[in-house]
Image: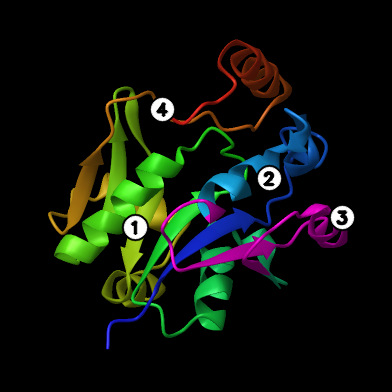
């Protein structure tokens, strides 16, 4: 029997460049993390897992979720791959995972849904989203790709594996829109607020 497809929201980083917990920054009556999480929860994924780490108690107490479960990564300083593996360890029967960083509040539910359908229709080894201005999340990682990634050493394992390697097993999902805005610095947060004021982040 085919296992579920799980959305993984990575919310464990220390936000060093921001200088404060960026996931708790206010945005449109919510927060950066909860705006991201709402888009994932509204999608066609079967399950949602949020992985916390730095500032875990603050982050976890702020989460507003309808169907997400929360797990804590004690080794979050080792990077996003350790957080991803924390999620997959708690959900071993999933057949594929869709990965979304928690600081990606303009990620579109419709794009996540396209990724879900890509999996259900073709069962690719892995996939990334190709926007009009570059490749970005969401990423799709199958169980086979996960097993391969676990054996891969180094930093930015998912980035190297899915974007930099030119592996022909990694499909590119075309999304004819700009890549979602992430939030790593105060200037990027200001740009996000400006974009929110102009567009309301509607998922067209």
CA distance separating discs 1 and 3:
29 Å
Q: How many marks?
A: 4
Q: Which mark is residue 140?
A: 1
In which quadrant will I find the C terminus?
A: top left
Label 1: state its secondary structure. strand
* Nearer-N-terminus badge (4/1): 1
Q: Residue at x 63, y 32 (%)?
A: 183
- List the residue tagged with mark 2: 33
Which mark is in front, 4 or 1? 4
Residue 39 in sight here: yes
Q: 10 Å neighbourhood of mark 2: few (<14), some, or many (≥20)? A: many
- List the residue tagged with mark 4: 204
Which mark is in front, 3 or 4? 4
Front-lying residue, 39 or 77: 39
* Nearer-N-terminus badge (2/3): 2
For this view, does 29 lie left or right of residue 148? right
CA distance separating discs 2 and 4:
21 Å
* Nearer-N-terminus badge (1/2): 2
Label 2: state its secondary structure. helix
CA distance separating discs 3 and 4:
32 Å
CA distance separating discs 2 and 3:
12 Å
* Nearer-N-terminus badge (1/3): 3
Q: Is residue 44 magenta?
A: yes
The quarter holding residue 170 reads bottom left
Residue 175 placed where, x, y %?
28, 33
Residue furthest bottom in the image = 1
Give, as a single range, the part of the protein colored magenta. 41-69
In which quadrant will I find the N terminus?
A: bottom left
- List the residue tagged with mark 3: 58
Q: Is residue 83 magenta?
A: no
């Amino acid at each position: 029997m085919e296992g579920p497809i799980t959305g993984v929201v990575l919310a464990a980083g220390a936000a060093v460049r921001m200088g404060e917990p960026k996931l708790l920054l206010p945005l449109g009556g919510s927060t950066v993390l909860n705006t991201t999480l709402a888009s994932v929860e509204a999608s066609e994924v079967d399950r949602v897992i949020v992985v916390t780490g730095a500032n875990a108690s603050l982050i976890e107490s702020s989460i507003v979720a309808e169907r997400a479960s929360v797990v804590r990564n004690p080794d979050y300083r080792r990077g996003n791959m350790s957080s991803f593996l924390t999620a997959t360890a708690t959900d071993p029967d999933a057949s594929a995972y869709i990965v979304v960083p928690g600081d990606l509040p303009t990620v579109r539910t419709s794009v996540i849904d396209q990724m879900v359908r890509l999996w259900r229709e073709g069962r690719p080894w892995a996939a990334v989203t190709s926007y009009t201005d570059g490749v970005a999340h969401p990423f799709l990682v199958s169980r086979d790709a996960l097993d391969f990634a676990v054996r891969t050493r180094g930093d930015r394992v998912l980035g190297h594996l899915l974007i930099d390697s030119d592996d022909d097993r990694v499909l590119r999902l075309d999304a004819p829109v700009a890549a979602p805005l992430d939030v790593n610095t105060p200037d990027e947060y200001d740009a996000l607020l400006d974009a929110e004021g102009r567009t309301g982040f509607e998922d067209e």
